[in-house]
Image (cartoon, rainbow, N blue to C red):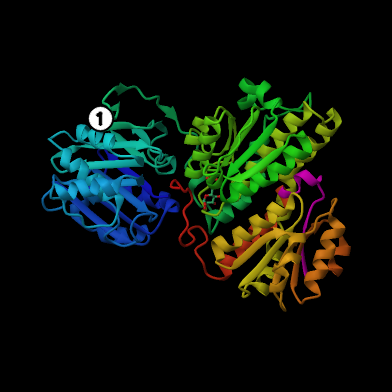
């Protein structure tokens, strides 16, 4: 959801900004732009990908300076177009030469715009961002930091901003509320970015700006204050990931790289969390609230997109393993009802980025209504991880592909461990836990086995990739896997796909089935196996093309389907960690075969920081 990079130092800003934008491009790619101070403030904007911007600025000496700001956009207010691309200025002819990039939404921009028009300001875009640039210009009296502080006191909404001004060519001012912003601290330089992937190539020392905090940077000093101008001392920390983790290496796409990383990322996720001697789960992030968590009367799981599907699996796990009533909710719906949060409720926010606006707002609402809040989050130090009372990090490393894969495995694994941890204190015997954990420890190797079928999955995909409508069916914990399979396919290949409980198909969607329609059915061995076979026959008898995900050794399945992908036999609660893998590969191959941009699907953004 929009990426920001800003630089002040001694190196050429242009190269660094372009490189940073490319790393942040997964956050949005409707348009991009940058401003560099070199005598005056030079600005370039371009529709579409960063490569277009690069062409404009590469040979232009106007962009040779050492201070600049840059932006890659995911449109919210105002269509994707050059005039709506950032940076925005306070008025390129009559203003103070202020240029600003912004991630977030200024909610009261309509009233501010009216006020500024009354003061004679002329607007050239449809964005809320331009209003903020004009407001800073209106309040500017020779001190950019002060003008930014004053303007931010007037706005409601969310922002991460970076601002430069022609009249103060040695200063960069950045600020944040609600949207993430990190300040990388190098030698005689600062690199500011929406996330650390644009920083680690330059420095591993950084501090996260707190909400409603402003930083004023020169090439060799910084000062942070609240918007009320109270001075603060930020804590500089070591960034946790390496450059290698955010490079493609030998893979064609980040999504494929991340699919193949899953055996290792799952190992890292569970490492040290299963005590070898006692065969128990050890979760550091739970210790302070152990009592409340174990005694929970109700669990509420909140998320969006892929994280919601992981949460839906969590619902089965908490009820089956821990025996605790559990509900799962779209975070976006939860907060706009009148949710009843009873005493003893734990609200668990499931999120890769830890920044999804709906999930954040929902967990805040649950907290306000008395729930203990918990984060199952990947990005360390993200807003959700900081705003929840307790939590467990996914530890799957940076996820760059817009379509989430390894984070899903991490989310399901964390929820499995948490459910087992609570379950052991309620109803699970030591032997049951020990067996489950031994199986969990073997899952990384099993994932590697499933990945070996990629060529076979590609061949099967070739046979059906021209079909525009697909169904994905599953039961129990594999129902959310069906939803996830359908989501992956539509996100990156733009094929229309619907996921649903296998039994639900009879209540309407069966009317869609015609000759050759691909229907992917998760039909692994388990309590509902026979019923799923029945559903497969219902599809086949209407001419549908059945692709089954089945348990290794199940030769019987071949009589009921056209194609089959096998996964190793594991206990039912752990099956989603394997059954989702062929569906990720299926979606990947379909997108590549259809010539789509796998890592940057149209209209999507990796992290949705607006509601
Ligand atoms: C966006 C992404 C999805 C992701 C969802 C939730 O829609 O495109 O891949 O699942 O947000 O993101 P989160 O960071 O909260 O897991």
In the image as oriented, which residue stretches furthest toward the front?
A: 338
Front position in the image: 608 or 551: 608
Query: Does the magenta-highlighted stretch encompass residue 567?
Result: yes
Residue at 79% across / 40% down in the picture? Answer: 439
Q: Give 559 or 52, whichever is nearer the viewer.
A: 559
Q: Residue 474 location, x and y as percent? A: 74, 57
Residue at (40, 38) in percent of width and height: 178
Q: Is residue 513 left or right of residue 336?
A: right
Find the magenta span and give its range: 562-576
* Image coordinates for residue 463, horizontal then vertical, percent: 68, 74
Q: What element carries label 1?
A: loop
Q: Measured from the top left, where is residue 13 in percent x and y?
A: 27, 45
Q: Is residue 187 visible?
A: no
**What residue occupies the far bottom of the structure in this picture?**
515
Would residue 573 be found to the left or right of residue 461 on screen? Answer: right
| Residue identified by numbered label 1 | 220
Toward the left, the furthest residue is 94
- Circle 1: is it few (<14), some (14-19), or many (20+) Cα within 10 Å? some
Question: Residue at horizontal 33%, vertical 50%?
Answer: 71
| 364 falls in the magenta region | no
Horizontal relation, residue 304 to residue 105: left or right: right
Would you place residue 521 above or below residue 62 in this image? below
Which is nearer the eye, 333 or 164? 333
- Where is residue 442? Give x, y as percent: 76, 42
**Is residue 599 visible from the viewing direction of this image?**
yes
């Amino acid at each position: 959801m929009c990426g920001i990079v800003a630089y002040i130092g001694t190196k050429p800003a242009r190269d660094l900004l372009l490189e940073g934008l490319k790393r942040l491009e997964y956050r949005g790619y409707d348009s991009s732009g940058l401003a560099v101070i070199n005598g005056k403030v030079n600005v370039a904007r371009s529709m579409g990908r960063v490569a277009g911007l690069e062409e404009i600025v590469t040979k232009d000496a106007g962009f040779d300076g050492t201070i600049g700001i840059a932006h890659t956009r995911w449109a919210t207010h105002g269509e994707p177009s050059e005039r709506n691309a950032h940076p925005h200025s306070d008025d390129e002819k009559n203003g103070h030469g202020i240029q600003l990039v912004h991630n977030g939404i200024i909610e009261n921009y309509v009233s501010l715009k009216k006020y500024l028009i009354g003061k004679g300001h002329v607007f050239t875009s449809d964005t809320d961002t331009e209003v903020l640039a004009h407001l800073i210009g209106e309040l500017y009296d020779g001190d950019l930091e002060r003008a930014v502080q004053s303007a931010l006191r007037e706005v409601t909404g969310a922002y991460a901003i970076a601002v430069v001004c022609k009249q103060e060519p040695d200063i960069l001012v950045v600020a944040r509320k609600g949207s993430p912003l990190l300040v990388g601290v190098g030698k005689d330089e600062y690199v500011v970015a929406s996330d650390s992937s644009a920083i680690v190539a330059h420095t591993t020392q950084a501090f996260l700006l707190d909400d409603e905090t402003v930083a004023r940077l020169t090439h060799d000093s910084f000062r942070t204050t609240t918007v009320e101008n109270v001075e603060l001392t930020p804590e500089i920390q070591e960034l946790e990931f390496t450059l290698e983790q955010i490079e493609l290496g030998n893979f064609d796409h980040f999504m494929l790289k991340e699919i193949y990383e899953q055996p290792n990322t799952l190992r890292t996720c569970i490492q040290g969390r299963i005590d070898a001697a006692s065969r128990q789960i050890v979760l550091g992030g739970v210790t302070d609230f152990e009592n409340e968590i174990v005694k929970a009367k109700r669990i509420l799981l909140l998320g969006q997109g892929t994280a919601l599907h992981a949460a839906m699996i969590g619902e089965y796990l908490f009820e089956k393993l821990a025996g605790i009533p559990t509900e799962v909710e779209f975070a976006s719906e939860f907060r706009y009802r009148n949710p009843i949060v009873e005493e003893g409720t734990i609200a668990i926010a499931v999120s890769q980025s830890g920044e999804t606006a709906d999930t954040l707002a929902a967990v805040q609402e649950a907290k306000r209504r008395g729930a203990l809040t918990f984060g199952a989050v990947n990005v360390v130090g993200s807003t959700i991880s900081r705003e929840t009372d307790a939590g467990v990090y996914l530890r799957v490393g940076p996820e760059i592909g817009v379509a989430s894969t390894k984070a899903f495995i991490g989310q399901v694994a964390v929820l499995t461990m948490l459910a087992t941890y609570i379950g052991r204190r309620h109803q699970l015997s030591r032997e049951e836990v020990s067996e489950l954990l031994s199986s969990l420890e073997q899952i990384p190797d099993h994932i590697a086995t499933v990945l070996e079928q990629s060529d076979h999955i590609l061949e099967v995909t070739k046979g059906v990739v021209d079909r525009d409508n697909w169904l994905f069916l599953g039961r129990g914990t594999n129902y959310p896997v069906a939803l996830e399979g359908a989501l992956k396919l539509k996100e990156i290949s733009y094929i229309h796909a619907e996921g649903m409980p296998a039994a639900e198909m009879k209540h309407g969607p069966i009317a869609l089935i015609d000759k050759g329609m691909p229907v992917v059915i998760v039909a692994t061995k388990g309590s509902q196996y026979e019923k799923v076979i029945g559903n497969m026959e219902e599809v086949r008898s209407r001419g549908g093309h059945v692709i089954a995900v089945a348990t290794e050794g199940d030769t019987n399945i071949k009589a009921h389907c056209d194609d089959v992908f096998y996964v190793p036999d594991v206990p039912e609660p752990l099956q989603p960690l394997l059954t989702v893998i062929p569906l990720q590969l299926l979606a990947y191959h379909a997108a590549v075969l259809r010539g789509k941009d796998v890592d940057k699907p149209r209209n999507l953004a990796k992290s949705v920081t607006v509601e």
